[in-house]
Amino acid sequence: MAEPRSTACALSRLPDEWAAGSAVALDRLQRTLPPCGDPVALSPSRSLRAALIVVAAGAVALTGCGSSSSDGDDGDATEAASTAGSGEFTPVTVDNCGFEVTIDSPPERVVTIKSTSTEMMLALGLADRLVGTAFADGPVPGEYAGDLDGVPVLSDNVPGQEALLDVEPDFVYGGWESNFGADTAGERPSLADFGIATYVSPAACQDPEYQPDPMTFDELFAEIREVASFFGATDRADALIAEQQALLDQVEAPGEGLTALWYSSGEDAPFVGGDIGAPAMMMRELGLENIFADVHATWSNVSWEQVIDRNPDVIVLVDAAWNTADSKIERLEGNPATAALPAVAEQRYLRLPFPAAEAGVRNAQAVVDLAAQLEELGL
């Protein structure tokens, strides 16, 4: 297996189910937020994309800046930042993983943690609101490559609270609940004390009361609508959902009658897709039967003996820089027990990048891509 860049990186890459344990107790940062600084200027490519999104959504809304500025330049930046809006903004209050979040005015200085949250903002045409990103699981899709020009990367992993506060965000959007903690970006109540709203992708809620069970594309579309509502971008949400549904409508369950293993990581014990998370959601769309459909979890550790006993027809390999699909193939083909599996012996592999393996705006395209790979196998 490809070694992580560091032990800390390896630990931070684990899903929340693996992050159980005592949080490191830290005193709250004793500081107050400075006045709102100048918003990040738009690069030409980002300005162009914002304009294109206005055409697609069919609406433009101009909202005033909710924070002060010392030089008067905020007006132009705020006008540009509002191009994805779809009309008069209505304050929003949501129960997010058991934490109440109120958005009184559209956030203007957003930090995203994890690829799923960054790509949600890009897909909604809100790149101009970003003042920082962190914990990227891989490069963004090519269509968004220029949208992050000039946006600072705060950390390759979860940023510390001081680094977060330095960019003066008014909204932090995390892909995992564990992104918010005393030893990471800060606890959500603490950030609220600084006037910073926080939001976690609902698919990543850990409390069974809030965790989607199972995850579905309807749940994902609900997140798209909810995030868009914070920015007055509901028309863009409708357009994005329609685009994603059109992608799904192209797929006619090419995996019907086939079983599959969703192999995310792990050497001694494979870490696999269970029955209620994004992997199961995508396998259902493909018509594949998950060999671990009896595991009531998003992801879970299982044994190689179980994999061999259940003998999948195909194996989905999650490809990450720190744990590549090629390294997984080497592991499968290098072990005599797994090498004897027909799926391994005949190289019936499907690949997808790590950012597409978690619930987010890449999932619909991932279903299309996996369907094409299935058809190429000719099973």
Image: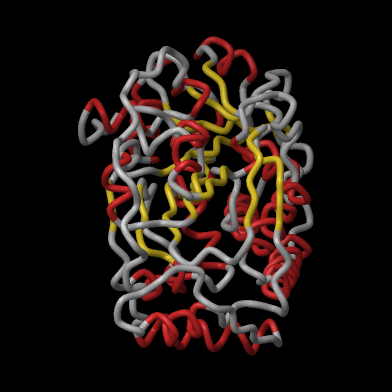
Quadrant position of residue 95: top right
Quadrant position of residue 42: bottom left
Depicted 20 relative to depicted 67: above or below:
above
Q: What's the residue at 38%, 20% (across, down)?
A: 267
Quadrant position of residue 255: top right
293 or 87: nearer the viewer: 87
The N terminus sits in image quarter: top left
Is 127 left, or right, of 6 in this rendering?
right
Depicted 362 relative to depicted 303: above or below:
below
Q: What's the residue at 21%, 36% (across, down)?
A: 5
Image x and y of residue 309, in percent:
61, 13
Q: Give the colour scheme shown.
A: secondary structure
Image x and y of residue 116, in percent:
51, 51
Is 157 left, or right, of 297 in this rendering?
left
1 or 190: nearer the viewer: 190
Is 43 left, or right, of 107 in this rendering?
left
243 or 47: nearer the viewer: 47
Image x and y of residue 201, in percent:
59, 44
The C terminus sits in image quarter: top right
Q: What's the residue at 59%, 52% (across, down)?
A: 360
Image x and y of residue 369, in percent:
58, 58
Is 19 left, or right, of 308 in this rendering?
left
